[in-house]
Amino acid sequence: MSALTLSSSSAATLRADAVVVGVAKNSAGKKASLVLAPGAEAVDKAYGGKLAATLETLGASGGEGEVTKLPAPASGVKAPLVVAVGLGTAARKDEAYDAETLRRAAGAAARALAGTKKAAFALPVVDADAVAAVAEGALLGAYAFTAYKGKTDGAKGGKDAKDAPLAEIALVGAKARDKAHKAAADRALVVAEEVHRARDLINTPANGLDPKAFAAEAKAAAKEYGLSVEVLDEKALAKGGYGGILGVGGGSAQPPRLVRIGWSHPKAKQSLALVGKGITYDSGGISLKPAGHNETMKCDMSGAAAVFSAVVAAARLGLQANVTGWLALAENMPSGSATRPGDVLTMYSGKTVEVLNTDAEGRLVLADALTRAGEEEPDAIVDVATLTGAMVLALGNRTFGIMANDDEFRAAVHEVAEEVGEDAWPMPMPAHLRKGMDSPVADIANMGERMGGGLVAGLFLKEFVPEGTPWAHLDIAGPAFNESAPFGYTPKGGTGSAVRTLVRLAERAAEGELG
């Protein structure tokens, strides 16, 4: 993880390997098409006031996330490299750049500086919110998953120093003695580290992270950060009647687990239960996935990774809330002991489910965990899952859907997601779609109408939420795993989607303002 420091030094005089400044499209109707963002003044002076003109000559447009590198002048700037990152349309003099713009710009610059030891970020930090945004973006952008790479030796194809994340981030203009600035930076560091934890788990291949190994990760974190932890193995699950989790995990040589990890505070104002889908590998089971759909299925535990990381973050931030995470862990594999299409499972709640498709397994493990979480009577429950391809068809690869049994709570979750910069959209749960899950042999089937499949999945989960408990379902199937090129602070591979939303919800619980 990159080191983070706050510096009141000038961007031009700070010793670093690179200095990052912001550039934007001019919106004032002047001849110059580029303007420098606040924070770049000292660097611009070293260029004789012609930095914007020089960048324009190099083809810079100021577009969001655009990165332009140029050598520093012979004198006036101690760093040998200047990196200009686009902020989009320039903010007016009486306005500040919004947090997500700064977050993405800092992330893009940090990614572009992989292999660099230290960079000074001279982006606009007019207040603590801006400090938080730049710090978080830079830290999130400085990420690489190298656990399975060889030793550092570029000539032999192993880890290469040039691919290592930016080692140190100095925020120019942020004041170490300013309590608000310091608190913002400290929080950003914790949140970014926990997003990285989730990313690492998601990127770990299934042969390195089965349910037992995931549970061990939870135990280790609980010991380190003072969390309570309980792990139900296959024997405890059978004794407790967790038919959904056992049914999904029954085809694998790696038995399932249900993990409860919890943070409690003696002055807690509210309690929040988080439930995560943790399918460490999803082959589809007997309803086997077609060729070309298996290669990234190590990411089907992204919901559990987000929940796990958010609970750890709550503990590290010392939030005055009780936050519990339920990790429903199983590997969905085909074998002679696997659940077959047409089988009926008796869930932890006592409801029976006819399994029409074994590739609709996430809702089965979540159903058991939702019921168990509800027994503790939290003030609200939020589940997170890479649940349906239908949600990706509806919202694309960068936006997760939000469903809920309470309109006000759904609106609150959406507001939080927007606040932290995670793209999300509220989705309905039409009552007429419930009929499609009627079963002639069980209380409910795990499949319904094909059209609106993401909404059908939400309706299925709703059946296992206690009456009267506010609940939201986040379907992160789109943004959880980025198969395309990196952008902003988002890397290729596991993204850690929903971690920041869950942490902010936990903070709202600490403020007594969940709904």
Image (cartoon, rainbow, N blue to C red):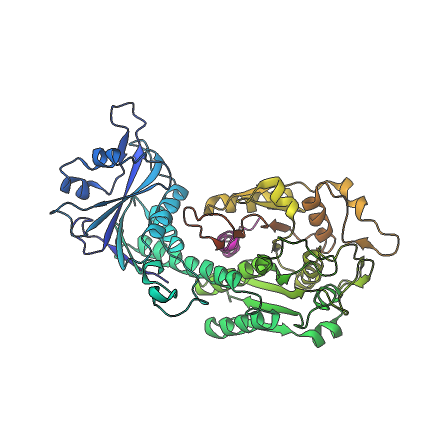
Please report the bounds of the magenta region as a residue range. 495-515
From the viewer's perspective, is residue 231 above or below residue 361? below
- Residue 106 can be seen in this image: yes
Quarter occupied by the N terminus: bottom left
Which residue of the protein is positioned furthest toward the left in this rendering? 75
Residue 321 coordinates in the image, percent (x, y): 52, 60
Q: How many numbered dots are placed on residues in this image?
A: 0
Image x and y of residue 290, in percent: 68, 53
Can residue 165 be seen from the camera position used here? no
Tell me if 436 is positioned left or right of 245 in this view.
right
Dividing the picture into quarters, in which one does residue 375 lie? bottom right
Pinpoint residue 386: horizontal percent, then vertical percent.
61, 53
Q: Residue furthest front?
A: 155
Q: Is residue 16 left or right of residue 288?
A: left
Residue 281 is one of the magenta-drawn residues: no
- Which residue shows up at 49% across the image and 46% down it? 422
Closer-to-camera residue (404/447) = 447
Q: Is residue 12 above or below residue 225?
A: above
Task: Report the residue that reaches farthest toward the right.
Answer: 440
In reply to whether residue 511 is colored magenta, the answer given is yes
Residue found at x 35% / y 41%: 66
Q: Nearer the viewer, residue 46 or 178?
A: 46
Q: Residue at x 45, y 67 (%)?
A: 147
In percent of width and height, residue 278 lies at 61, 62
